[in-house]
Amino acid sequence: MSQVVDHLAELTGFRDRDVMDVTLVMALRDLLEPESVAIYRCIGETGEERWLTRAHLRAGEAVATADPLWAMPESLPLATTHPLRLEAMRSRNVTQVMQGESWLYLFPIATDRDVVGVIEVLSSHRLGTGAQRMVSSVLRIYHNFQGLLDYSERDTLTGLLNRKTFDESFLKVLSEMPARPAVSHEGEDRRHDVAVPHYVLGVIDIDHFKSVNDRFGHLIGDEVLLLLSRLMRGSFRFHDLLYRFGGEEFVVLMRCDEEVHAGEAFERLRLNTERYAFPQVGHITVSIGFTEVRAGDAPAAAFERADKAVYHAKGHGRNQVHNYAALVARGVIREAEQQSDVELF
């Protein structure tokens, strides 16, 4: 019993979801002594769901493996390739089957709204009722703690990430970037170049939102914010980080190969918003500005650049998407001074 308590204390000692998932598989590995234990999340659009490995640990391994959070969906296995996992999610019950001489156990992982994945345990011995009940109890604690994190990290109206979580995510992004841009020389053999991740920060602002509140009331205004958050989820990828900063202002932090791809994603949201008929209100539009995250950036510096692009859109007709770098290159706006890389919101 003390071993279980120790693992639960360690599990609930972190606020980082990635660390929590790794800690969970390590706890189950120590408690059950299986051949392997893994957490799989079902992600993606309906009909194109994929399996994202959150943590996978085999007996004797010291470090769990996982898919990158920014993995391209097409690189992940389709959900239909593992029907037993889907069945466990659908039934919301523990599933157990024999695989060769081993036992495979699938425990569904649920949130307050849905079942989002499974924990998969492969064991050379059959797990007794007590062991299965222990895993289910650990998962209930895991679920409850995830709910507490959601409450502190997410906007209560839209369910998007809230502003206070932004700095931590931004600093994680910076940690994946090189200290300075790679320099290439003409004629140099570049066959061994390492791909450098590129990140983009976008700011989205609803046009004339004050008039929506003035004409229809704050309840209808809140419904507009909620529906826009749903349009955002449908316009961006599952791993893009979506935030509500307060009022009618939203932020997106995304990884992409080129700024043009980011522009296409923001333009998709602009069009989806323009075409959507909001109940009672009718049609609304959004103004969007975005900028590439630079090595050594401060959150405030990147946000200010994107916000300047939004300000330009607002002053030139609204319902537009603008790239800060393109505006600077055209001489439309002046380059902002680089702020200290330790300055935070």
Image: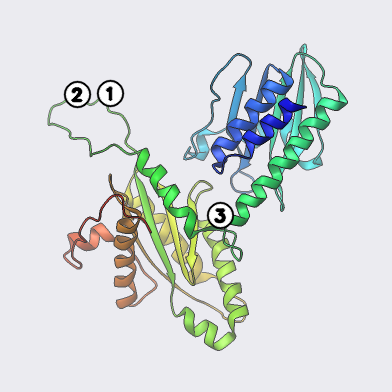
* Position of the N terminus by quadrant: top right
In the rendered image, the residue lying farthest to the bottom is: 215
In the image, taking residue 337 as reference, residue 260 lies left or right, namely right
User: What x and y, as percent, mark residue 186?
Assistant: 12, 31
Give the residue drawn at x 72%, y 20%: 122
Q: Residue at x 32, y 50 (%)?
A: 293
Which residue ends up furthest to the right in the rendered image? 129
Residue highlighted by disc 2:
189
Please report the residue visible at 49 percent of the width from the left and 53 percent of the height from the top.
Answer: 165
Give how far apart the Cα atoms at labels 1 and 3 are.
Answer: 40 Å
Q: CA distance from mark 2 to mark 1?
A: 8 Å
Give me the C-alpha separation between circle 2 and circle 3.
46 Å
Q: Above or below — where is 226 with respect to 52?
A: below
- Residue type at the position of mark 3: Glu
Whether 54 is drawn above or below 251: the answer is: above
**Kind of residue sitting beneath label 1:** His
Marks 2 and 1: CB-CB under 8 Å? yes
In the drawing, what numbered circle is on residue 192? Answer: 1
Residue 153 is labelled as: 3
* Percent of width and height locating residue 220: 61, 79
Going from N to C along the chain, the mark reached first, 1 or 3, is: 3
Circle 1 SS class: loop
